[in-house]
Image: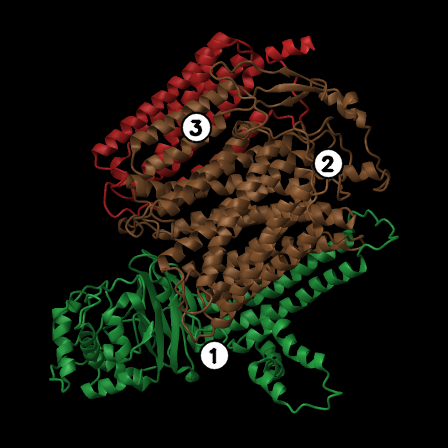
């Protein structure tokens, strides 16, 4: 390729900056948002595989009453790890990974605003997740449920190391998530293509902006809660020591002040994905774009005003329960509006039943059902029955599993051609869809009834004769069916890598900017800075005048913005090493080896200084477009 | 709020329940067709004219109910010992009513959303020669209507919800007529104290029918949740915090209601069960009297009981457990272990895990971990100890004789399995 | 090409297009501070939740010395004033004064930390520790976290100061001091909240 590159910086005196373009070193030092996006997505799916395995073992244990597949302790570890993994290590990173890859492409940016921070965010997430998983081999996984209610986490009730792995692992991965969210905010606010006003930002990027704001406000309370437990267990403070008069309920407040926004942190990216898939496959713009954005913002705000609906049974009194019940109802309104607007987008369209659209439809159905049960559990009177039962388990699996996860499966099928340049098999995809969706409903629908028939959650067995046999058996059979679906999805990915047809730039006849790049996009993303003058820039380019007479801007106009070349940020070791120092330093604290922890801490501080003085670095790229045949 | 119990409970959803009553027989007959017995009647029906009884139809008749209506099928067993669909008190009834109201509201919502979706997918599927769809960004009028619809639905849910919150969850002030019980959660059993009656017992809450019961909930270790689905729903037991839960019963409520801890408390959480025994006032009074009468040392006619009584001391049982009728004026054990006073009156053993038959009690004493994995009861014999089974049976016999006036009666009572 | 290469070597490359007028680093700092507000908010919330819940002494009123803490608060406030002067000097490209005022901020910050160390030692001698009671736990962790923030700020300013000797600093680099200043003012404001909520409330 005819390009010229100029070095931006020669500041790095201490270390030579890495410049590998292939091999393992290139991945460890990468700051490219696309590579980091792929790392996120692959890691998230690996963690999801682990979580699914844990779920299968649990379902097997619950197949019939009084099974003995695992003992109560192992069962506690299984559901804790399943929850932690799905929430913190699989679904949320999937959204962040997709955002990493596609937000810059959708808004016409060349990378995120702080590429090395982005790399750091990934590595602390990866190390934090791995750290939690090492607990299986180092004396037992955490066993107090993913919500880790105090005082189950105090040394006197839970002396094992599992709790420490949970706290430290999520603590550092939380720091990474917060950093990445800040990065995304700056990127979306500052790095939109010329002409892309906020009301021309694609919905997925918009939802990621809202999600990122929720992350930066919701994660600090969680981080503080983790910190308090860590200090209690490592340094003997009294935050949750009940003999000293501490209030275990404080943990629940801190946790759920994070925990409920977290639900929307997970589901808003999924809303964004659905809002990309449905317009593409009905060949229509999104119905009511401004209302979709507004409802997303409303959900983001209200998400912070509903946390005690997880605590209706903790004796807060009728006034508090009423207030939070009403705010929870109110959040149902923008959510309902979103569902209607997706139907409005399909209405009058020309609908093509591809695999991504099928997942979007499955999302609509499951999410509607999850929304209805959501309204039900928001009624404190009814919640007094079903709180902490399988009804709630069914509800949040309908929202987070059947909602967010289905949407992300759709995103996988939708964006896979863009990420790899290869199409996934439609036939295999549809077969997998049938198994996944049917299995899902068979797995989780009976759990509503199980809860109402008297089955609490987090029990490793249930007695015979109180009517729980049939629902549990159906549920376990459902897990097998869904398992087949998941394996078929994996098979589809492998098949696409081996046999996939070349995708081309725009395989779905889509509408947004990411489809104007090659598949997979070159490392510099856009050869010319895109310029935008409408909501669906690619559609306007393909169909001049179709949308209210708008025609695409002159493609030459973007070149003026590239007069100084395309900045390619320099690779760096510091994010990786800093994250590593942080992670192994936590082992030092866990095993009470303070000296080792301090050495790691100093290494971390050294990395931060090295990072700061190394500078952004990198090269400026001058593409010779004529030779490239653009 | 003390006047709450004097107002006759009138559900705000009474009219709805009227229609529900109409619907139930209809539903029942449908369900009957779908359940086993229904299927059997169908299967055993005389085969009609071969021309009429087409094979696919017969096949369909069997498969359709199972495959298509599987979720409905399960609803035939919604009644149950621990099911919120079998309420036995006004609070549980109100909780169920509220659910049913939202459930009926959600049916049109589902029909609307899924129906519209189905229509759109069929009507607007891509066909050859379709014109390009109109590139419309939305229609404000439609959007406003679509926003108003969820608002209306929410309002219809919110009004009965708020009313029911204040009726069922308001803090009540006890009157002398109420039964007050301090409930203390332990890993993994329940302590019930009747401060007005001077009774301490474990894992079995006795209340007289028709009276309001006020529970003061607290925990000795971690967070638990007191959940008795057919009477009261649940409230958490949280250390350093006093919570309240109240419920009442009506004349049809006499019976035994299982409950369970609903908040993860590690170890034997799944086995942290209990029973609420709602009995007639007379039965309740005699139960109370058994606790309040002075301890009289009687010589048991059954040598097994005598042996058991000695073993309780020799094996160290009273190091942990108090047994009020063991010796006058002496308190044994420690408060963090279940009180075994008048154990013979209990229906279950091991915090509601097994029925208190002599065999089950002996099994529990001989090897508690096999009955309730993770619990804190020590195993008193080596697994191969030849004396184990006999001694466990003796202790069981002694325990089951407690609180029963005559030892033989005690054994008779126990062998019927209580419950 | 060579012209561009030479501009690149001095780092004077024109910034790429941005859709917002705020520099990226400054926007980043605002976002970070928004997040940090919740961080301190949770710690202060914990402190308030456990206010007057300690089972054993010493209690806040036995220990707090309002005049002393007022002095240290005043020192911290004054450091914010010096920070404004330092930023102004750098914008005017007056490197000498920039160094003076920045050093002043760092020194005032260190004096504040000195007060805190004195206070902590004093409290420890009076029997308060993180293991003693809920007040000790919440007080030390809250004010300690604030102290860590001040320490980070001092380190940051010192490294800016050292940097100014290593490579030329110009008015266009003011944004790097500006974000340090934003951070410093924020930490200052947090202290005022802590001073009010933790110290003054005891003597209302």
What residue is disc 1 on? B8
Picture residue at 79% right of the left edge, 48% below the top: A283
Q: Is residue A401 above or below residue A506?
A: below
Chain C, which colour?
red
What residue is disc 2 on? A513
Using a 10 Å C-alpha cutoff, classify the residue at mark 3 as few (fewer than 14 neighbours), some (14 to 19) or many (20 or more): many
User: Based on the displayed image, in which of its 4 quarters is residue A556 positioned?
Assistant: top right
Chain shown in brown: A
Camera-near label (1 vs 2) is 2
Does residue B15 show up? Answer: yes
As helix, strand or loop, the secondary structure at mark 2 comes to helix
Q: Which mark is residue B400?
A: none
Tell whether A475 sits left or right of A366: left
User: Based on the displayed image, in which of its 4 quarters is residue B238 positioned?
Assistant: bottom left
Chain shown in green: B
Picture residue at 67% right of the left edge, 90% below the top: B47
User: Based on the displayed image, in which of its 4 quarters is residue C112 positioned?
Assistant: top left
1 and 3 marks in contact (CB < 8 Å)? no
3D distance between C-alphas at marks 1 and 2: 66 Å
What residue is disc 3 on? C188
Tag 3 subunit: C
Tell whether C127 sits left or right of C112: left
Q: Position of residue A404 (x, y in %)?
A: 59, 51
- Do marks 2 and 3 share a subunit? no
Q: Quadrant of the C terminus of chain B?
A: bottom left
Using a 10 Å C-alpha cutoff, classify the residue at mark 2 as few (fewer than 14 neighbours), some (14 to 19) or many (20 or more): many
Q: Is residue C38 above or below residue B285?
A: above
3D distance between C-alphas at marks 1 and 3: 60 Å
3D distance between C-alphas at marks 2 and 3: 44 Å
As helix, strand or loop, the secondary structure at mark 3 comes to helix
Count of marks, rendered view: 3
């Amino acid at each position: 390729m005819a390009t010229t590159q100029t070095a931006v910086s020669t500041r790095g005196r201490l270390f030579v900056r890495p410049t590998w373009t292939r091999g393992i070193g290139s991945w460890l030092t990468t700051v490219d948002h696309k590579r980091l996006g792929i790392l996120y997505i692959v890691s998230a799916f690996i963690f999801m595989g682990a979580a699914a395995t844990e779920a299968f073992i649990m379902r097997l244990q619950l197949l019939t009453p009084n099974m003995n597949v695992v003992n109560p302790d192992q069962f506690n570890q299984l559901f804790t790890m399943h929850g932690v993994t799905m929430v913190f290590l699989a679904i949320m990173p999937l959204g962040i990974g997709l955002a990493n890859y596609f937000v810059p492409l959708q808004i016409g940016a060349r990378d995120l605003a702080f590429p090395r921070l982005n790399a750091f965010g990934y590595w602390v997430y990866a190390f934090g997740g791995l750290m939690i998983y090492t607990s299986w081999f180092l004396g037992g996984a955490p066993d107090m449920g993913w919500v880790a209610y105090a005082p189950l986490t105090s040394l006197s009730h839970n002396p094992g190391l599992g709790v420490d792995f949970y706290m430290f692992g999520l603590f550092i991965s939380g720091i990474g998530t917060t950093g990445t969210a800040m990065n995304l905010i700056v990127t979306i606010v500052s790095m939109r293509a010329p002409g892309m006003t906020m009301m021309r930002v694609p919905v997925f990027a918009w939802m990621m902006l809202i999600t990122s704001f929720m992350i930066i406000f919701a994660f600090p309370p969680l981080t503080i809660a983790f910190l308090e437990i860590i200090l209690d267990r490592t340094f003997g403070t009294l935050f949750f020591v009940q003999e000293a008069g501490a209030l275990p309920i404080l943990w629940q407040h801190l946790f759920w002040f994070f925990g409920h926004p977290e639900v929307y942190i997970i589901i808003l990216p999924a809303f964004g994905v659905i809002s990309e898939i449905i317009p593409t496959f009905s060949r229509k713009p999104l119905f009511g774009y401004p209302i979709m954005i507004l409802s997303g913002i409303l959900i983001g705000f209200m998400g912070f005003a509903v946390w005690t609906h997880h605590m209706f049974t903790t004796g807060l009194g009728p006034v508090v329960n009423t207030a939070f019940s009403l705010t929870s109802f109110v959040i149902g309104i923008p959510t309902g509006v979103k569902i209607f607007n997706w139907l409005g987008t399909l209405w009058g369209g020309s609908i093509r039943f591809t695999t991504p659209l099928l997942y979007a439809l499955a999302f609509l159905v499951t999410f509607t059902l999850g929304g209805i049960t959501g309204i039900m559990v928001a009624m404190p009177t009814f919640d007094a029955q079903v709180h902490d039962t399988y009804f709630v388990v069914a509800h949040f699996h309908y929202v987070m599993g059947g909602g967010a996860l289905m949407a992300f499966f759709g995103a996988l099928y939708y964006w896979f051609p863009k990420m790899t340049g290869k199409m996934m098999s439609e036939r295999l995809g549809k077969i997998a869809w049938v198994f996944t969706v049917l299995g899902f409903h068979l797995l989780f629908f009976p759990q509503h009834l199980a809860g109402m028939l008297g089955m609490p959650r987090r029990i490793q067995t249930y007695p015979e004769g109180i009517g729980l046999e049939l629902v549990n058996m159906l549920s376990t059979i459902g897990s097998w069916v869904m398992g087949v679906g998941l394996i078929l999805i994996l098979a589809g990915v492998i098949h696409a890598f081996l046999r996939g047809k070349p995708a081309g730039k725009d395989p779905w006849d889509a509408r947004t900017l990411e489809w104007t790049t090659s598949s997979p996009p070159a490392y510099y993303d856009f050869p010319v800075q895109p310029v935008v003058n409408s909501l669906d820039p690619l559609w306007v380019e393909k169909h001049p005048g179709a949308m209210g007479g708008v025609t695409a801007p002159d493609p030459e106009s973007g070149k003026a913005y590239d007069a100084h070349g395309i900045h390619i940020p320099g690779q760096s070791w510091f994010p990786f090493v800093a994250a590593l120092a942080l992670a192994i330093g936590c082992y030092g604290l866990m095993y009470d080896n303070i000296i080792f922890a301090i050495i790691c801490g100093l290494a971390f501080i050294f990395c931060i200084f090295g990072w700061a003085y190394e500078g952004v670095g990198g090269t400026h790229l001058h593409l010779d477009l004529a030779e490239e045949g653009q | 709020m003390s006047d709450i119990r004097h107002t006759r409970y009138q559900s705000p959803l009474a009219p709805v329940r009227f229609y529900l009553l109409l619907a139930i027989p209809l539903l029942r007959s449908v369900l009957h067709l779908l359940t086993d017995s229904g299927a059997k009647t169908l299967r055993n029906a005389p085969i009609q004219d071969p021309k009429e009884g087409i094979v696919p139809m017969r096949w369909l008749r069997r498969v359709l109910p199972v495959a298509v209506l599987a979720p409905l099928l399960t609803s035939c067993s919604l009644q149950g010992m621990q099911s919120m669909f079998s309420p036995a008190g006004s609070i549980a009834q109100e909780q169920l009513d509220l659910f049913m109201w939202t459930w009926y509201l959600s049916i049109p919502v589902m029909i609307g959303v899924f129906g519209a979706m189905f229509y759109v997918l069929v009507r607007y599927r891509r066909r050859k020669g379709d014109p390009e769809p109109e590139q419309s960004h939305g229609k404000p009028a439609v959007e406003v209507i679509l926003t108003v619809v969820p608002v209306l639905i929410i309002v219809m849910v919110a009004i009965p919800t708020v009313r029911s919150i204040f009726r069922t969850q308001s803090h009540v002030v006890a009157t002398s007529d109420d039964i007050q019980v301090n409930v203390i959660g332990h890993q993994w059993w329940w302590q019930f104290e009747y401060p007005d009656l001077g009774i301490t017992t474990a894992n079995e809450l006795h209340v007289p029918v028709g009276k309001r019961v006020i529970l003061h909930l607290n925990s000795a270790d971690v967070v638990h949740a007191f959940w008795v689905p057919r009477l009261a729903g649940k409230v958490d037991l949280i250390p350093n915090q006093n919570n309240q839960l109240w419920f009442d019963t009506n004349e049809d409520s006499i019976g035994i209601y299982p409950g369970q801890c609903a908040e993860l408390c590690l170890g034997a959480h799944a086995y942290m069960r209990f029973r609420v025994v709602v009995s007639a006032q007379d039965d309740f009074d005699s139960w109370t009297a058994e606790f309040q009468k002075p301890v009289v040392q009687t010589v048991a006619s059954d040598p097994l009981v005598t042996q058991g009584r000695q073993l309780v001391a020799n094996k160290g049982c009273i190091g942990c457990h108090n047994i009020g009728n063991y010796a006058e004026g002496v308190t044994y054990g420690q408060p963090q272990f279940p009180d075994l006073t008048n154990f013979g009156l209990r229906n279950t053993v091991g915090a509601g895990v097994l029925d208190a038959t002599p065999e089950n009690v002996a099994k529990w004493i001989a090897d508690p971990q096999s009955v309730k994995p993770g619990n804190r009861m020590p195993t008193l014999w080596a697994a191969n100890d030849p004396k184990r089974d006999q001694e466990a049976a003796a202790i069981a016999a002694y325990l089951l004789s407690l609180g029963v006036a005559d030892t033989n009666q005690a054994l008779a009572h126990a062998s019927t399995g209580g419950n | 090409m060579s012209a561009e290469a030479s501009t690149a070597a001095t780092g004077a490359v024109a910034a790429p297009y941005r859709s917002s007028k705020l520099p990226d680093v400054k926007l980043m700092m605002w976002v970070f501070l928004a997040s940090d507000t919740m961080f301190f908010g949770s710690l202060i919330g914990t402190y308030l939740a456990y206010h007057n819940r300690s089972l054993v002494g010493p209690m806040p009123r036995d220990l707090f010395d309002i005049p002393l803490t007022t002095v240290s608060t005043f020192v911290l406030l004054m450091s914010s004033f010096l920070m404004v002067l330092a930023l102004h000097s750098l914008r005017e490209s007056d490197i000498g004064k920039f160094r003076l005022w920045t050093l002043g901020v760092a020194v005032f910050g260190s004096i504040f930390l000195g007060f805190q160390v004195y206070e902590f030692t004093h409290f420890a001698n009076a029997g308060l520790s993180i293991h003693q009671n809920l007040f000790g736990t919440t007080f030390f962790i809250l004010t300690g976290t604030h102290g860590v923030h001040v320490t980070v700020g001092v380190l940051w300013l010192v490294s800016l100061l050292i940097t100014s000797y290593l490579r030329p600093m110009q008015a266009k680099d003011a944004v790097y001091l500006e974000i340090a200043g934003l951070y410093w003012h924020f930490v200052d404001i947090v202290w005022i909240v802590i001073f009010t909520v933790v110290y003054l409330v005891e003597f209302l």
